[in-house]
């Protein structure tokens, strides 16, 4: 079964993502900060991470993305960055750090679902 790790410090956004993806057959896991995200990623070996860019703590989403993509055991994991910033430079920064996709907040549940399906199809 496909594992998805949802990483965001806002419980409301995690709940929206969880409710949207509940209709799929994926196993869903959650983390609230970068440190927990990395720890869980090493334990779970997720197929996809939905990762907020700006989070409290020592590691932001871009740093977590870099760590995931530079770890052989996790490099296959698709990383979908989520941010309120959607300028071209923000997208380039995410791309530079290894992100496989980028969702700009606010996004619709249908857009989230189609993006997740697209990302997971590429790993199949």
Image (spheres, rainbow, N blue to C red):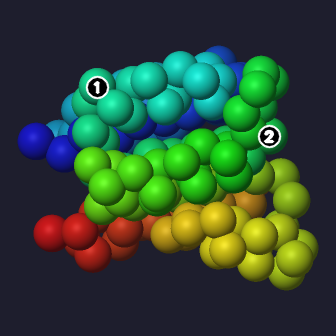
Percent position (x, y) of residue 99? 56, 65
Provide the secondary structure element on which disc 1 rests.
helix
Residue at 74% x, 39% y is 60
Residue at 80% x, 40% y is 54
Percent position (x, y) of residue 93? 77, 70
Percent position (x, y) of residue 95? 64, 74
Q: Is residue 50 above or below residue 118?
A: above
Q: Nearer the viewer, mark 1 or mark 2?
A: 1
- Residue 28: give its label: none
Q: Which quadrant of the figure contains the C terminus? A: bottom left
Which residue is the site of mark 1? 43
- The residue lying toward the viewer, choosing from 30 and 111, is 30
- The residue lying toward the viewer, choosing from 75 and 89, is 75
Q: Is residue 9 left or right of residue 4?
A: right
Q: Is residue 74 left or right of residue 111?
A: left
Provide the secondary structure element on which disc 2 rests.
loop
Mark found first going from the N terminus, 1 or 2: 1
Q: Residues within 10 Å of mark 2 (few under 14, many from 20)?
A: some
């Amino acid at each position: 079964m496909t594992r998805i790790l949802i990483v965001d410090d806002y419980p409301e956004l995690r709940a929206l993502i969880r409710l949207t993806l509940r209709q799929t057959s994926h196993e869903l896991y959650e983390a609230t900060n970068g440190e927990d995200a990395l720890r869980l990623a090493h334990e779970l070996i997720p197929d996809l991470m939905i990762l907020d860019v700006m989070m409290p703590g020592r590691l932001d989403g871009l740093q977590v993305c870099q760590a995931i993509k530079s770890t052989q055991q996790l490099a296959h994991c698709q990383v979908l960055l989520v941010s309120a910033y959607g300028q071209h430079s923000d997208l380039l920064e995410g791309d530079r750090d290894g992100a496989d996709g980028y969702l700009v907040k606010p996004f619709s549940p249908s857009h989230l679902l189609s993006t997740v399906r697209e990302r997971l199809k590429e790993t199949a």
